[in-house]
Amino acid sequence: MQYVVDLHLHSKYSRAVSPQMTLPMMDKLARQKGLDILSSADFTHPVWFKETQTLLEESGEGVYKLRTEIRPACRQGRERRTTKDTLFVLSTEISSIYKQGDKLRRIHNLIFVPNLAIAQRLTQELIKRGCNLNADGRPIVGLSSKDLLELILSLDERCMLLPCHIWTPHFGIYGSASGFDSLAEAFGDLSPYIYGIETGLSSDPDMNWQVPELMYRSILSFSDAHSAPKMSREATVMELEQPTYENIRKAIMRLSVIASRRRGNLNQNGIDGNRIAYTLEFYPEEGKYHFSGHRNCNVVYTPEDIRARGTVCPVCGRGLTEGVFMRVEQLSDPKLFGRAVPSFDEHGVKWYTDKLKIQPPYVKLVPLLEIVAESLHSTVASQKSQQLFAKLCSEFESELTVLLKTDLADIEHLAGWKLAESIQKVRKGDIAIDPGFDGVFGKVAIWREEEEKQKAEEKAPQLRLAL
Ligand SMILES: [Zn+2]
Ligand SMILES: [Zn+2]
Ligand SMILES: [Zn+2]
C-alpha cells in the first residue's frame, strides 16, 4: 500500500516556527492535505518530548498515533479520511557547527530513531557531550556530522541520519558556504550509512540525479514546514508492506542495498516490497536559493551570468550568495545530464521518469492554496482563498487528490472554470516562475496577463448562455 510521507517538520519549540505546530494540529492538517505518515519533530527538546509522550501512543513497530481520547477534539468538518490514523515516526533535525579541514562547517541533518527509549538515550548522550537542547527544537551541537552518525549507530543500528536540504549555501552538506564537496569527505568511512538525502525546496530530483555519489542513494523530499499550511509542499510516497519504522527504513535503504548486492555483498538484509514509489516536488525555481545573488542589492545571476560576469556583486562588491543551480553544476557529472524523461498520465499530470531506471519518478506541484489565491486574484492569507481551499480539500478528499487526480470537470463544477484551468496548467507544467535567490522565494505565475484575458473572453459567451 502507498503512504504519503513527510518526515521533516518542526514543533512550536523550534526557532521561527508557528505556535500552531502542535501534534493535534499536524494530525488535523495531514488529513486535509492527504499525508499519512509524519515526523513527530524535535524529539531532543525536553518539553516537546514530554508532550510527544503524553499525546502519542504506539500504533505499530516504531510508529505512533494521537491517543484516541484526544483525537475527536481535533477533527472538524466533513473529513473523509477519518478511518485512517495519521502516523508519526520519531525524528528531529540537528544543526552541527564544527571545524573540519580548517573550514567552519554548518550542517543540518535529520535523525531517525526506532522508538521513544532510544530517542531518550540519544538525548542523554547529547547532554553528556555538553549540548544545550533547551534553547531550540532544532538544537545546535558541536558534534561533527560524522560523530553524530557514529553516536546514533552506536545506540541502535536501526537509527538513520539523512542530510537535509543538502544544497542550501549555509546549512546544506553540499552547501557552497560551509558544506563539503562529497558525502565521503563529510562522513569518511561511515558514508555507506548515508542511505539517502533530502533535496530541499531549491533542487529537484533531476538536479540530484546528476551527482555520481547519489546514484544509489534515496532522493527524498519533505516539507521542512515551520507552519501547518506548509506541510506536504514536498513529500515522498512510499510503497510499504506495513506502515512500520523498519519498513520505512528499508524503503530508504533500498538503493544502497541494491548497489551493495551488485558489488557482490549478499550479507544485507532483505528489502522486500518496501520502496519509494515517487516524490512530490516544489518547483525548484520557487525555492529560496535557486539562483545566485544578493537580496539587499537586488542582484540575481543565472549560471550563465556567473560565467560571463563572475561571482562578485556589482552593487556592493562582496561575493554573491551562490545558488543551488550553480552549486549542482560544480558537483555533477555532465554524462548524467538529461536523465529526467517527461510524460503525462490520464489526469494530465506531467511526470519525470529516470532514463536509467534507477531512481523513482517525480512530479512538480504548486501548493493548492497558491493556485486558489491566484485564480481568485487574492492572497493566500485571505478568507476567501482559505475557504475555497478548505472546501476543495473536504469535497475531493485531500489537497494532494485535488492536485493530482480529481476530474477537472468536477473541480469546475464546484469552483468555476478558472480554478479548473489553473490546476490543469499546473499539472501540465504550463506556468512561469521568477526564480528565488539569496533567501527570497521564487514567484509563481500560473497565468500570463494576455493569456488570462483571452481565456476569459472565450469563456464569456458560455457564461452568458448559462445565465
Ligand atoms: Zn535545516
Ligand atoms: Zn528543518
Ligand atoms: Zn551585493
Image (cartoon, rainbow, N blue to C red):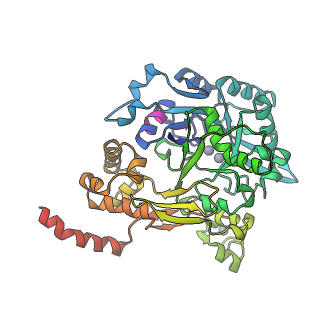
Identify the residue shown where x is 50% and y is 58%. 364
x then y, percent, for residue 272 = 63, 39
Q: Is residue 136 magenta?
A: no
Residue 274 figure quarter = top right
Residue 331 figure quarter = bottom right
> Camera-side residue: 442 or 463?
463
Identify the residue shown where x is 77% and y is 29%. 155
Lateral position of residue 96 relative to residue 429, left or right: right
Q: Which residues are magenta?
A: 25-29
Q: Quadrant of the C terminus?
A: bottom left
x then y, percent, for residue 262 = 76, 51
Identify the residue shown where x is 61% and y is 62%. 206
Residue at the farthest bottom position: 308
> Camera-side residue: 33 or 352?
352
Q: How many marks?
A: 0
> Camera-side residue: 307 or 267?
267
